[in-house]
Amino acid sequence: MAKRRGIEVSIAIAEAAALAEVDVVSAYPITPQTHIVEHLAELVANGELNAEFITVESEHTAMSAALGASLAGARAFTSTSSQGLALMNEIVYIASSMRAPVVMALANRSLSAPISIWNDHSDVMNERDTGWISIFANNGQEAYDLTFMAFKIGEHPDVLLPVMINFDGFILTHVVEPIYMFDKEEVEGFLPPYHHPYVLDPERPVTHGPVGLPDIYTEAKKQQEEAIRNSRKVIDAVWKEFDERFGRRYNAVETYKADDAEVVLVTQGSVTEAAQVVVDEMRKQGRKWGVVEIRLWRPFPFEDLKKALCNGSIKCAVVLDRAISFGGPLGIVMSEVRAALYNLSDRPMVVGVTAGLGGRDIRFDEYVRMFELGEECLKEEKEPDRVIIVGLRE
Amino acid sequence: MVEIRFHGRGGQGAVTSAEILALAVIEEGRYAQAFPAFGAERRGAPVLAFTRISDEPIKIRIGIYEPDIVIVLDPTLLRSVPVFSGLKENGIAVINSKKSPEELKAELNYDGNLVTVDATSIAMEELGVPITNVVMLGALLKAKPELAKMEYVEKFIAERFPKIAEKEVRAFRRAYEEARS
């Protein structure tokens, strides 16, 4: 039976990879992810995990080695943050394009400069268009569950795509909290062995990632786009099976008290639960507020989001972005939410806010301010073009 | 929910205290969360660690600005760090000091709840090093026994310090006995 225990979330994430019996861990340490790969290195060194731990000289190589291992038929895992992911970028794009189901645990951290080791979502948003399945966890339990399930999703023969699990650096990685940890017998049969249909094998040579001349490149990209779009069926099926077996439900879009809400905050990551606390508290004062979380970032859950936001009650969706798109509308998630609702006549107003950049705490009254900004925009019937930075000192 | 803020210096084990307390609470089936203030930690520099304790799942993850309890592992911090900052009106300060609560209250011009313990002396006598993290947990439980069960705190002290478990547990118990309020 799953044992409930107090554990640092980073260690739990490493244990999820170990539970999946990864064959290859290829990683380079970077704050705040380091404890994850340190723990895996320890498990391998102690003989508790039968895997190859490849110590590399950079994240670029970490992803290259994971990609090669994955195509050679090994279950491959890596973990990084921020600058590490930015340095990986070239191979991140190649891994999805070569259909290598690597799993990456991404401890979300801001990007330099100025140097910041603290949390926001700059790193994942910078990789938005790399073709990975991308999922957000809100707490330690979710980070553990989703990391374990990522292998089953990515390696499914109908998917064969890499998966990144996002969880807030420090805010989640460095916290000790209760997590239900599986034992091996309990998950028996959930995760089938990994087989790549075109595995690298000297006996039966195949070529991956050769030159794509102009007469084939477009078709290759179209196939890749279809693959990630189709992965949604598998994602839903895996989450459903997990719920049936272990009793925890994951959805592409999660809603909290949104049914009768007039204003909702649209969130990703650990701010989701904090926003729920604010909603609970402010509902006592009669404020009809709710929370809608975009858990599945890629493939983007268009239909689920439309259903959640166009429920006949919500008049304004305030989207909280944890990163900035400079020189654009600022809000990356806000733009995507607006685009998803663009052609709907009954859509709510979409207002963008950003906060919590570079590790700044978002305080209770700042969440209240976000909801109130939504109410003010409704009153003035004005939908701002650009996001409003909440908590900015001027 | 009870929110506790630990003040220590890098290397004194404030984070370890915060974690041991949380682990003991979680072992009971209740909810707890422990985490460090995320900064560039340096040995000797003032550091913070936090523990939240609740009967419900804990959804808040920001730092603790209005603690129910503050714990000060090192008396020299009183001169340089605003340790009482945001402490709730009926909150408790648990301070490593040779002085009695009355003396220290007068000195610090503080009239709230105060528990003192000479943690440095206990640590030197029992452990031979001025590391007061586990010792201060003893004083904390004296100040607010319902926070966690002694036996579970002792269990996780022993797990964290397997080679000197007996000494650490003895230091912890002494602080529990000797804390003054």
Image (cartoon, coloured by chain):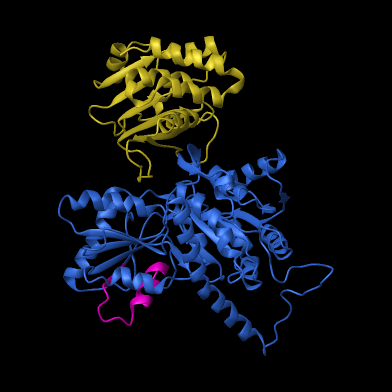
Chain colours: A blue, B yellow
Q: Position of residue B123 (x, y in %)?
A: 51, 14
Q: Is residue A280 left or right of residue A170?
A: left
The stretch drawn in magenta includes residue A333: yes
A190, A371: nearer the viewer: A190
Q: Quadrant of residue A390?
A: bottom left
**Which region of the structure is painted magenta?**
A329-351
A232 w.r.t. B142: above or below? below
Against B135, residue A116 (above or below) is: below
Q: Position of residue A328 (x, y in %)?
A: 42, 73
Residue pushed farthest bottom?
A215
Outermost residue, right side:
A203
Q: Is residue A285 visible?
A: yes
Q: Position of residue A394 (x, y in %)?
A: 32, 56
Write the residue at 65% across / 84% down: A217
Looking at the picture, does residue B159 appear above or below residue A93?
A: above
Q: Is residue A281 magenta?
A: no
Question: Residue A331: in sight, yes or no?
Answer: no
Q: Quadrant of residue A211?
A: bottom right
Q: Is residue A276 left or right of residue B11?
A: left
- Quadrant where the N terminus of chain B sits is top left
- Left or right: B94, with A74 as reference point: left
- Out of A368 and A357, give the one closest to the viewer: A368
**For the C terminus of chain B, which image quadrant?**
top left
- Percent coordinates x, y for residue A291 in the rendering: 30, 59
Number of numbered labels in the structure image = 0
Q: Nearer the viewer, residue B31 or A330?
A: B31
